[in-house]
Amino acid sequence: MKINGAELLVKALKKEGVDIVFGYPGGQAIDIFEALYDEKSIEVILPRHEQALVHAADGYARSTGKVGVCIATSGPGATNLVTGIATANADSVPLVCITGQVPLGIMGNDAFQEVDIVGITRNICKYAVTVRRREDLGRIIKEAFYIARTGRPGPVLIDFPKDIQIAIGNDIYPNEVSIRGYKPNRDVHIGQVKKAIAELNKAKRPIFLLGGGVNIANANEEVQKLIELTGVPVVTTMMGKGAIPSNHKLYLGNLGIHGSYAANHAISESDLLFSIGTRFNDRITGKIEEFAPKAKIIHVDIDPASISKNIKVDIPIVADAKIAIEKITEYAKKLDIEPWVKTVMEWKKEYPITLAHYSGLTPDKIIQYINENYKKPIVTTDVGQNQLWTTQFIELQGNKQLLTSGGLGTMGYGFPAAIGAQIGNPKSRVFAISGDGGVQMNIQELATAVSLELPITLIIFNNEYLGNVRQWQEMLFKKRYSSTHLKYRRSIKEENANIPYTPDFVKLAESYFAYGKRITKEEEIPEAFKFADEHKNAPTVLEFIIDSKINVSPMVPIGNALNDMIMQC
Amino acid sequence: MEKRWVSMYVENQIGVLAKITGLFSGKNYNLDSISVGETEDKTVSRITMGLTCDNLTYEQILKQLNRSVEVIKVLDFTNMPIHKKELMFIKVNLDSETEKNEIFRLAQTFKFDVIDYNGKTAVIQAINNDKENEQLIQLFENYFKNEIEVVRSGSIAIEKI
């Protein structure tokens, strides 16, 4: 049968099992939306900004494990995707982003709404390609989905010129894919596993370090089995949180510059660091020369380029985390490391992460309410203190429950990601936890959530500041709060002047026909959540007024070794 | 810091060269020379790259190149027996009779040809390895008082039999 390019795209999406796409139309994408209009099996979600569109697709992908699909128009539509693509790339999220493009014949002539989006995104996605011939279209889409979801997952961009969209051609969508430059390895090398096991069995102070790769590979049950079999304590990265249940007795918390005392000290004292699915980002290593100085390092990762990039690894194992862990478990045994386990457990008990030195309405109490009252909710965060508190205090039972921009640190991520997560998980309770700064970067998505009748609870920790930067300014820049106070008025100079916060988040919510409530006291937490629970077909904004002086603790100042921490900031 | 040589098979498509060079600039790697050309298979190009870096960075560069979808195969030529040549042109204005005689005499001793000459200006062509061409540039700078104009192709290399 002869169909046009846009129709072949729709056919391809169906063959890939896509039932949700996140799309924003425009002049050079109109034919795609025309082709989607009659397709009953695919729902098109219309966010209110293309950046939010990608974050929503990202939240959908992270929470379901499926590929997120984005469609935007050329030029500004495409450039608005950039931050979201870079966010997904940093956190290994599978996306296929399709951008309309001006017709091939006028490409390069600075046409209206023309931009070289392949050139712009080349360094921030896994693969980017322009469709230049109608007969290549089916193969290119097939390859895009394959590249996005295999190996270390990531975003793929297809630039789709208008004339190819309308060009009539065959309707063939290939079943197979063969890319000569892309052959990701999943299987594990047994020789490396045996070497790793030999080191593990010798170790007196071993520790497992689990990153986001464990969650992406769905290796949660397998890794828990391995940990319980060996009896080795475990820490996670921010992205690895949930790899094993947070209440597991061998779990010491997150490591890193806001990690727990026990996790950071365990890494620093360990003689064997068994890491899986992490890339040793500077936020987890602290001063790199003093990271795990006494340890031999084993590193399992599906991406060879993540091995020995930041930290020199002694035994690399390139493989899918799940396959590797299963194989390692076959050879592993119970270790005789009782004194070590006792030591780290004492650290865990002695130095918990806490905000107990503050009174009143504190973020930990709000998160604790979620921990105690909701079963397996999905929680998204924005970036900054809200993210650090959430990843410190939230308790998870498994993966796909915590969505956060860990790698790129994108403000504005949390709320649209929650929209994608709620769409992909209609039965789950979804919370977006944000700060008053970041939430304003994509606040327009209230309209999307209202129009789709999504019962998301948007939690705003309003402390009037870009709090994370404020904390640094307080601690490291002599309290010079340069450009971080969001209550600023040009004509008012005195501190603590009684200025109303802008916007009024409750009124703002109501203006979108969402529900809103402001909470100022600790006692009001339960009723606030009950208020949100009542609204099954609309989002609720809960604005918690947080004292701006509450800082994230503990903290490893930049340049310090991991175990050189300030316990109370 | 050591000199390295890499040979790659890549897809012969628009943007592939930009992908490779973008990787180098984006990741702060140092690239000394790069030359690209089509192979016997029109869908494949071959790139020869010269770079200077430490061992750790080099390991990362090879991995990053390998993980690029557009890169079909990466060969480390650094310590392999290879044939490696670079084409270089030098244009120079010759002011005196001594200089005019000198250039033809040098051509008999060193490995280059005078391929163009009009009595005032000469163009020479040299096909050597990159180090020999460096030495030739030095030689020309020492022998001729006018500024020289140098164009180099970057090295290309192939495995020895």
Image (cartoon, rainbow, N blue to C red):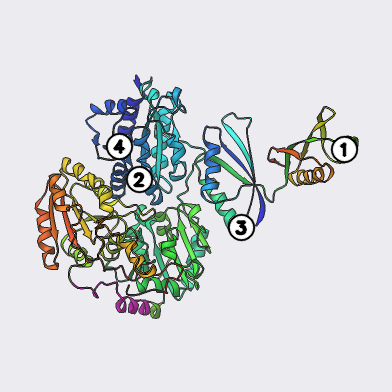
Q: Residue B81 placed where, x, y %?
A: 72, 47
Q: Residue A82 placed where, x, y %?
A: 38, 43
Q: Do dots 2 and 1 share one subunit? A: no
Span colored in magenta: A341-359
State whether residue A247 is above or below residue A447: below
In whole angstroms, how far apart are the C-alphas of marks 4 and 3? 45 Å
Q: Nearer the viewer, mark 2 or mark 4?
A: 2
Split into 4 quadrants, where in the image is the C terminus of chain A? bottom left
Q: Nearer the viewer, mark 1 or mark 3?
A: 1
x 35%, y 79%: residue: A342
Q: Do dots 2 and 4 share one subunit? A: yes
What mark, if any, has residue A84 been given in the picture?
Answer: 2
| Marks 4 & 3, CB-CB < 8 Å contact | no
The residue labelled by disc 1 is B99
| Marks 4 & 1, CB-CB < 8 Å contact | no
The residue labelled by disc 3 is B55
Q: Residue A83 placed where, x, y %?
A: 37, 46
The chain ID associated with circle 4 is: A
In whole angstroms, how far apart are the C-alphas of marks 1 and 3? 45 Å
Instruction: Judge left or right: residue A250 versus residue A276.
Output: left
Q: Residue A396 placed where, x, y %?
A: 26, 61
x 41%, y 55%: residue: A321
Judged from the image, the secondary structure of the residue bearing numbered disc 4 is loop
In whole angstroms, how far apart are the C-alphas of marks 2 and 4? 23 Å
What mark, if any, has residue A17 been given in the picture?
Answer: 4
Quadrant in the rendering for residue B141? top right
State whether residue A127 is above or below residue A322: above
Judged from the image, the secondary structure of the residue bearing numbered disc 1 is helix
Q: Do dots 2 and 3 share one subunit? A: no
The chain ID associated with circle 2 is: A
